[in-house]
Amino acid sequence: MTVFANPVLPGMYPDPSVCRVGDTFYLANSSFEYFPGLPLHSSTDLVTWTPLGHAIDRTGQAGLLDLAGVPDSGGLYAPTLRHHDGLFFLACTVVGGAADASFFLTTTDPAGPWSDPVFLEGARGIDPTVFFHEGRVWWAGCRLVEPGAYPGQTEIWLRELDPVAGRLFGQEHILWNGAVAGAVWAEGPHLFAHDGWIYLLAAEGGTERNHAVSVARSRSVTGPYVGNPGNPVLSHRQLGATASVQNVGHADLVEAGDGSWWALALAGKLSAIALFQAKYSLILNAAGG
């Protein structure tokens, strides 16, 4: 695949998370306070996407998540979609309801139905991810440092997950505070194994003009992680307030069948008629832009 046009999903499709099963790619996005929630798409080329429905589409599910009580820009944040041993996993957070909580859903068919949410005790913060590696299942998330050295300082933490019992267990590990000292909102973590390394991909800078993607790696899932000296590896913030595409960040990676790696990322398009920003999904070659 060498020719494509961005955005691949115009409109309200922020915080993309993608996985591949055979020849098909599957995509999930944030939906915040809207119901049905967590839209899903499929594609065979990463460019043309077909709607599959929503992971949260039953009133029983929504009742457990208390979507009716969340404010604007609350609700379902930054899902992570993964596939393992015939089962799809969707990790997510509900923010601003009766209680902020992280949970996961499962299904054998991404078109649904999806399970009721399984809430995880002790999974504080937002933007969770699930990572299957060498027979173990890991859960990572983002939360504010308490007390923080400065406003917006976050940490990405990791614990092991028992997906059958629906609980976290074992030691907690702090993986990342951002690419540079003073960086705000290191969030949206995703973990990948490649060529003997574990890669940690994270959003950084907040979902505005300073938005960016940074990456670190380690020989071990639990760290320590060393940042890429070229961080951030993706951002439009250097283009200024008049750039037609802004706020680029919050990416996920996927390996295609030919061994190439691709990134799907959030972006906002600045309209020449009105200052309206539609959070859509971009596709980029992870090796070359």
Image (cartoon, helix red, strand yellow):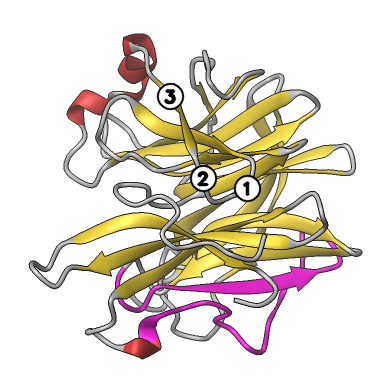
The residue singled out by tag 2 in the image is 48
Question: Which quarter of the picture shows residue 209?
Answer: bottom left
Q: Residue at x 42, y 71 (%)?
A: 153
Looking at the image, is 40 positioned above or below residue 133? above
Q: Nearer the viewer, mark 3 or mark 2?
A: 2
Q: Mark 1 or mark 3, which has the lower sequence index? A: 1
Position of the N terminus by quadrant: bottom right
Q: Which amino acid type corresponds to the residue marked 2 in the rendered image?
A: Thr
| Horizontal relation, residue 29 to residue 222: left or right | left
Please state which of residues 24 and 265 is positioned toward the viewer in this rendering: 24
Residue 23: x, y in percent?
A: 74, 38
Residue annotated with mark 3: 53
SS for dot 1: loop
Residue 221 can be seen, yes or no: no
What x and y, as percent, mark residue 41?
A: 50, 35
Asked if labels 3 and 1 touch by Cβ distance under 8 angstroms, the answer is no
- Mark 1 vs 2: CB contact within 8 A: yes
Disc 1 from disc 3: Cα separation = 19 Å
Q: Which residues are magenta?
A: 208-237
Kindly report which numbered mark, 1 or 3, lies closer to the viewer in this rendering: 1
Instruction: Looking at the image, tell me whether mark 3 or mark 2 is earlier in sequence order.
Output: 2
Q: Secondary structure at mark 3?
A: strand
Relative image position of residue 255 (x, y in whole percent): 74, 54
What is the C-alpha distance between the residues marked 3 and 2? 16 Å
For disc 1, the neighbor class at 10 Å (few under 14, some 14 to 19, many from 20) is few
Of residues 166 and 131, the one drawn nearer to the viewer in this rendering: 131
Vertical relation: 247 (above or below) 282: below
Tell me the SS state at disc 2. Answer: loop
**Circle 1 sits on which residue?**
45
